[in-house]
Image: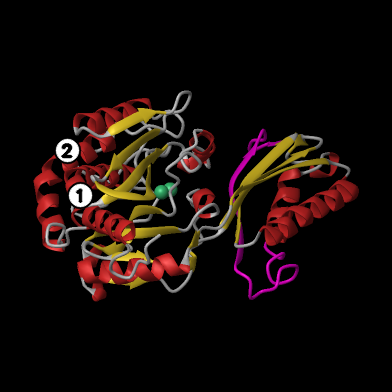
Amino acid sequence: MKDELISKEKLFSLIQDIYPQLTALRHELHEQPELGGQEVRTSQLVLHTLQKWGIRAEQIPGSTAVIGSIIGELPSGVCIALRAEMDALPIEEASGVAYTSQIPHVMHACGHDVNTSNLLGTAWMLQKLRPYFGGTIKLIFQPAEEICGGVKEILAYGVLRDAPQPSAILAAHVSPRYALGQIAVREGFANMAASSFAITLHGRGGHAASPHRSDDLILAAAELITRLQQIQGHLVNHIEPALVVVSAIQSDGQGNVLPRTVRFSGTVRAQTREIHDVYRVQMKKFLEAEEMCLGIKAELNFHFGTPAMYNSPELTKAFKQAEGELLGVQQVIAVDRPTNGSENFAEFSERLPAVYFHIGGVQPENIGRVAVHSAEFCVEDMALQTGVPAMAWAALCILQGKHGFVQV
Ligand SMILES: [Zn+2]
Ligand SMILES: [Zn+2]
């Protein structure tokens, strides 16, 4: 790397050149959000933008994923991958931003519009800098992250397998928990593995005034939901992080009708697969006991969705050092504990050394004001002014084994 030509000042100057275009792209993505697996318009926009900038890119057949590559002009066989997600959520936007969603009940409430724009900006910057570095950067624009999808097709397409094989992968996610100008990262486990479950109870319905002549499935469901909370601390060691939440309940009853079916569903969060298994097995036992006591029928559908995300400690240490040099050490937050969230970037982090980091998205006084996945969710365009140089800098440092990174 001709260091004098890829200085941090150079990156901060380049981001100013592309920022108006990136902001426009971000607003367009935000106004036209698409649900997981349906990112047709989004992936076309990503594909055409990359191609317009002279970057080799293609859509994976049968998927909305877009894969691109940038090859530095100096000799090097090193390869890394950069990944962003593109999908939105089924939420009616109430953020009040000028570029609010134009699609009823679909919203970029996790900030994937920013993440996608951030990777586009990073790609533009690295494309500009091709004469000054060697190696290959594979770009992964992943669909369907919110529904635990998108990765299988990317792996099957050979992005990690085909030469040159990436030796590391990075991903950035905007966050309303950190201020503009900051980035945040955790070494080791960064979040929880997630399972989803649904429990369906079938029994005798009847008049609400005569529960003794029916099976009162609502009462049975209420008891079961409460009992699930006893698993943590009694069947799982209380020092292990573990969480079960029921987030939806449906029945075919009404005010004066006891239902014949009650269905409730939710999520389990814990770090290890073993703890998820404890929940699955225990739910089954609770349901068998309920069937025996009440003579009802109970079904369990339990799905282990996403493993816990693991940031390679060596790579993350080097990443923090490099970003400290770029942004100032006080702007690089070391996250002290994993979050309860899940992220199927974990599917990549299981396969190669990975760093997943957050980009601060709000003014300091607004930290924590809005939650991800809420109708009020809102992060600022300015996040891109930190996110793009941070991602490009990390990529360049890894490729060249500079600023704390060992040559990979
Ligand atoms: Zn999300
Ligand atoms: Zn997200």
Q: Main secondary structure of the magenta part?
A: loop
Q: What's the mark number on residue 402?
A: none
Instruction: Kindly report the distance in space between the C-alpha atoms of the residues bearing marks 1 and 2.
Output: 10 Å
Horizontal side, residue 25 vs residue 344: left or right = left
Does the magenta run of residues contain 244? yes
Q: Which residue is mark 1?
A: 381
Residue at point 16%, 44% (across, down): 128
The amino acid type, in three-letter code, at marker 1 is Asp
Under circle 1, the secondary element is loop
Q: How many marks?
A: 2
- Is the CB of the residue bearing disc 1 within 8 angstroms of ligand 2? no
Mark earlier in primary sequence (1, 2): 2
Q: Quadrant of the C terminus?
A: bottom left
Horizontal side, residue 95 vs residue 215: left or right = left
Horizontal side, residue 136 vs residue 255: left or right = left
Crowding near pointer 2: few (<14 within 10 Å), some, many (20+)? some
Q: Relative to 57, is 171 above or below?
A: below
Q: Which residues are magenta?
A: 229-257
Q: Which residue is mark 2?
A: 24
Residue at point 85%, 39% (across, down): 213
Q: For this rendering, which residue is in front, 38 or 130?
A: 130
Q: Quadrant of the N terminus?
A: bottom left
Under circle 2, the secondary element is helix
Q: Position of residue 66 (x, y in %)?
A: 37, 33
- Would you say the residues marked 1 and 2 are in contact, meaning their CB atoms lie under 8 Å apart? no
